[in-house]
Image (cartoon, grey):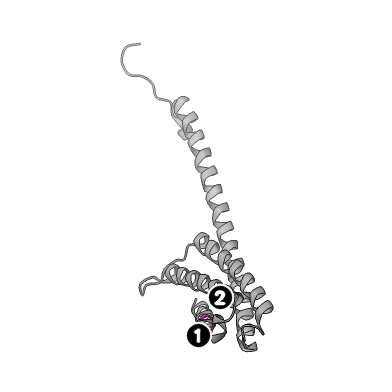
Amino acid sequence: MAHIRSHLLAAFAVAGFFMSAPAFAQSSACQEGQKILQERQGLVQQINKLMDGGGKKKQVDPRAACSIFTKLVTNGSAGQKWMTDNKDWCQIPDQVVEGFTKDHKRSQEIKGQACGAAAKMAEMEKRAKQQQAQQAQQGGMAGKMGGGLTGTLSIPKGAL
């Protein structure tokens, strides 16, 4: 997960560049990009919280990761479109656009992995619930038939 952190640091660097660019004061289009990057920064903070185990190795919940990375990919698509449309007007350097594009591709890969793991987890939980239901149903029938699968039958004691 260390590669994810470096990936996220690159996103912060891009956001820092846009926050300090003088062109933002000139155009509402440039301010729109700032909003996209602020949203991205919030999503990156959510990912960091999800992965931070307080110094311990923490198992990341794939469902939560899938949800956040889905939002991050949506944000990245909007950011890429915005950068392409406003690169010249907002004076965005080529290196920043290239870095953002790489960051977005990496987010898409991680989203695929997280969502794939979440789907597998959901399938396993579904199977476990089905097995529990089958076992409960079989256990209920065995109790009614007098002893279940042990092969013994209780004979009442006392006078017949």
Badge 1 marks a residue whose secondary structure is helix
Q: How many residues crowd mark 1 within 10 Å: few (<14), some (14–19), many (20+)?
A: few
Instruction: Give the percent coordinates (x, y) of residue 41.
Output: 49, 74
Q: Is residue 127 above or below residue 108?
A: above
Q: Which residue is mark 2?
A: 31
Q: Which stretch appears magenta?
A: 13-17
Magenta span includes 43: no
Q: Is residue 21 left or right of residue 93?
A: left
The amino acid sitting under disc 2 is: Gln
Instruction: Give the percent coordinates (x, y) of residue 19.
Output: 50, 81
**Extreme-left residue of the structure:** 158
Q: Is residue 11 left or right of residue 154?
A: right
The amino acid sitting under disc 1 is: Ser
At 56% across and 68% down in the image, what residue appears? Answer: 72
The image quadrant of residue 97 is: bottom right
At 64% across and 84% down in the image, what residue appears? Answer: 98
**Extreme-front residue of the structure:** 26
At 54% across and 86% down in the image, what residue appears? Answer: 22
Badge 2 marks a residue whose secondary structure is helix
Q: Which residue is mark 1?
A: 20
Q: Is residue 38 left or right of residue 159?
A: right
